[in-house]
Image (cartoon, rainbow, N blue to C red):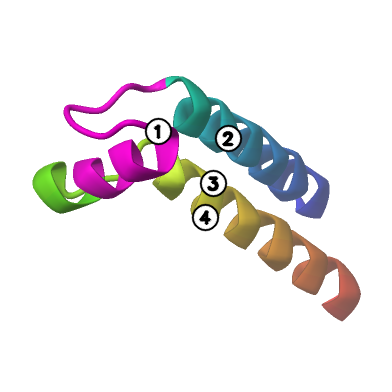
């Protein structure tokens, strides 16, 4: 179970990084400003949720492995 959670976390992190690099925004000249405007206007930053969820899954997987 821990291994599956760890792999799922790695997939989410990779997907989040990909989305943050490739998604365009409505306004802004670079990726950082586009993600900030998407966060303010749409309530979501491109790929940020996937990235943070992936990190959380990896941390939980490591904690459950250590506790077992």
Contact flag, marks 2 and 3 (Cβ < 8 Å): yes
Q: Is residue 55 left or right of residue 36?
A: right
Q: Residue at x 66, y 45 (%)?
A: 9
The residue where tag 4 is placed is: 52
Q: Label 4, secondary structure: give it.
A: helix
Horizontal arrangement in the rendering, residue 30 relative to residue 65 (left or right): left
Q: Which residue is mark 2?
A: 17
Q: Nearer the viewer, mark 4 or mark 2?
A: 2
Q: State which quarter of the image contains the C terminus.
A: bottom right
The structure residue drawn at horizontal position 71% and vertical position 40%, both measured from the top left corner, is 10
Q: Are marks 4 and 1 in contact (CB under 8 Å)?
A: no
Q: CA distance from mark 2 to mark 3?
A: 7 Å
State the residue position of label 3: 51
Question: Which quadrant would residue 23 be assigned to in this image?
Answer: top left
Q: Position of residue 28 (x, y in %)?
A: 26, 34
Say which label, 4 or 2, has the lower sequence index: 2
Structural distance between the alpha carbons of marks 1 and 2: 15 Å
Other residues around mark 2 within 10 Å, as few (<14) / some (14–19) / many (≥20): some
Which quarter of the picture shows residue 41? top left
Residue at image coords 52%, 55%: 52
Q: Residue at x 82, y 46 (%)?
A: 3
Q: CA distance from mark 3 to mark 1?
A: 19 Å
Q: Which residues are magenta?
A: 23-38
């Amino acid at each position: 179970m821990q291994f599956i959670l760890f792999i799922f976390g790695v997939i989410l992190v990779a997907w989040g990084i990909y989305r943050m690099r490739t998604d365009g925004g409505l306004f802004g000249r670079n990726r950082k400003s586009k993600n900030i405007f998407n966060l303010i206007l749409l309530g979501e930053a491109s790929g940020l949720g996937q990235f943070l969820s992936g990190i959380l899954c990896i941390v939980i997987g490591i904690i459950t492995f250590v506790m077992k």
